[in-house]
Image (cartoon, rainbow, N blue to C red):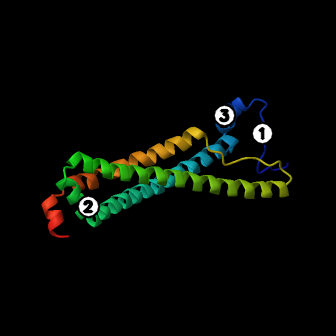
Amino acid sequence: QPVYSSISVRVKNPAQVQLVEDAIKKKGFGTFSILDASRGLQQVFKVLYAFLGIFGSLALIVSSIGIVNTLVMAILERRREIGIMKAIGASDSDVKKLFFAEAGAMGILGGVVGVALGWAIGQVINFGTNIWLKSQSFPPDHFWAVPWWLVAVAILFSLIVSLISGLYPAGRAARLDPVQALRYE
């Protein structure tokens, strides 16, 4: 009498995979289906998304600190200018607006440069992938495509992060006492 270590079962309707798998398990046999493989793959992607989220958050924090640092250094280097502006009548809100404008410009520039670099990297990946696909006799495809709405959201997000990061430095510049600023320069 022959002994089999495994058998393959195919279903005509993919919606019945789970039902057939459950019926086989009820008879005391172990099973492995495409659904199990799919669940394992989903777990891998969940972990990957978590790591990407962590790295993205760290990049966001580091860039925010960089913006704050840049603006604080600009305040320290331009204390005299801020003091003169306030001495000749510039209000605190005028000084805040100036530093918010600088933060916004950094955000827009950073967003545009980031989108451009991302697009360029995507094109290189597409090019390399298509070379590999051709070598395997597959038709070329366009894997890394970004919708225009996502480009706009990325630039807007970078602007918002920059403006939020500019809150503290702008407030610090606005609170600068013109007499103190002019005295030490």
Q: Which residue is mark 2?
A: 81
Q: Position of residue 98 (x, y in %)?
A: 31, 51
Going by the image, does 40 lie left or right of 165? right
Looking at the image, tell me whether mark 3 or mark 1 is earlier in sequence order: 1
Of the pair 143 and 163, the residue shown nearer to us: 163
Residue sitting at the far bottom: 185
Q: Which residue is mark 3?
A: 18
- Position of the C terminus, as image quadrant, is bottom left
> In the rendered image of this protein, does residue 112 appear above or below residue 21?
below
Q: Please state which amino acid type lies under the numbered disc 3.
A: Gln
Q: Position of residue 108 (x, y in %)?
A: 46, 49
Q: Which residue is mark 1?
A: 9
Looking at the image, tell me whether mark 3 or mark 2 is earlier in sequence order: 3
Instruction: Tell me whether circle 3 and circle 1 mark residues in contact (CB < 8 Å).
Output: no
Going by the image, does 111 lie left or right of 84? right
Please state which of the two labelled residues, at mark 3 or mark 2, is closer to the viewer. 2
Q: Please state which amino acid type lies under the numbered disc 1.
A: Val
Residue 90 can be seen in this image: yes
Of the pair 49 and 152, the residue shown nearer to us: 152
Q: Residues within 10 Å of mark 1 (few under 14, many from 20)?
A: few
The residue positioned 61% from the left and 40% from the top of the image is 147
Question: For the residues marked 3 and 1, what is the alpha-carbon distance in whole angstroms?
Answer: 12 Å
Q: Position of residue 93 (x, y in %)?
A: 24, 45
The residue positioned 35% from the left and 59% from the top of the image is 65
Looking at the image, tell me whether mark 1 or mark 2 is earlier in sequence order: 1
> In the rendered image of this protein, does residue 145 appear above or below residue 58?
above
Residue 48 can be seen in this image: no
